[in-house]
């Protein structure tokens, strides 16, 4: 007689696409790692069925992946393979992202955090000072960090309005008629 047990997960804090992967590639990798466990995915519901010992290992792996997605917001393919290959019951996985880098949760539940050392420095300076000037090349996240910090302050009711002010300097295009003058 074969004993089959079942465990269900409801993916409410994370996106099913992030967990299952594009075309269920990550789910297929889980199925390959635990061949005796049946994975049934229906939207946000994930059900595991199988022998108790193997189901326990697969359940622990799914919980690890859900925790990883919840703390990081997303997992790269390399990180997913690292977690899947590391298994369960070993020491904690190293992480480059500190909780101090967290800024806020976005509209779709994704985590917005500082990703580079320059962004971490902006975040640290903003926590210590009222005004922060950030200089650097285009595309390094200066405006993104400023807006994210402003939205966090708005959500925490530290401020009531956000004013986005940018210089009216022509950069190859004409701005046309703008009312007012320098005064």
Image (cartoon, rainbow, N blue to C red):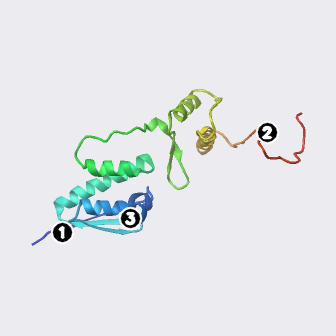
The residue at which mark 1 appears reads as 4
Q: Earlier in the sequence, mark 3 or mark 1?
A: 1
Q: Is residue 61 left or right of residue 123?
A: left
Residue at the front extreme, as displayed: 172
Q: Nearer the viewer, mark 3 or mark 1?
A: 3
Q: Are marks 1 and 2 in contact (CB under 8 Å)?
A: no
| Alpha carbon separation for disc pair 3 and 1 | 24 Å
**Alpha-carbon distance for marks 1 and 2?**
69 Å
Residue indicated by mark 3: 24
**Residue at the left extreme?**
1
Quadrant of res 130: top right
User: How far, Cα to Cα, is label 3 from label 2?
Assistant: 48 Å
Residue picked out by circle 2: 169
Q: What residue is at 25 percent from the left and 50 percent from the top?
A: 87
Indicate whether 25 appears above or below 110. Answer: below
Quadrant occupied by the C terminus: top right
Can residue 67 be seen in the rendering of this structure? no
Q: Secondary structure at mark 3?
A: helix
């Amino acid at each position: 007689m074969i004993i089959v047990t079942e465990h269900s997960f409801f993916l409410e804090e994370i996106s099913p696409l992030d967990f299952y992967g594009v075309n269920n590639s990550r789910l297929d990798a889980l199925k390959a790692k635990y061949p005796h466990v049946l994975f049934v995915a229906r939207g946000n519901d994930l059900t595991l069925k199988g022998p108790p010992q193997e189901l326990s290992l697969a359940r622990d792996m799914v919980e690890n992946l859900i925790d990883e997605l919840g703390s990081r917001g997303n997992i790269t393919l390399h990180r997913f393979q690292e977690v899947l290959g590391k298994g369960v019951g070993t020491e904690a996985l190293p992480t480059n992202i500190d909780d101090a880098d967290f800024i806020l949760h976005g509209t779709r539940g994704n985590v917005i955090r500082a990703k580079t050392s320059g962004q971490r420095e902006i975040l640290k300076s903003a926590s210590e000072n009222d005004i922060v000037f950030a200089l650097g090349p285009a595309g390094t996240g200066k405006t993104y960090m400023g807006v994210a910090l402003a939205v966090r302050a708005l959500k925490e009711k530290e401020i009531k309005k956000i004013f986005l002010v940018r210089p009216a300097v022509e950069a190859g295009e004409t701005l046309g008629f703008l009312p007012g003058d320098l005064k």
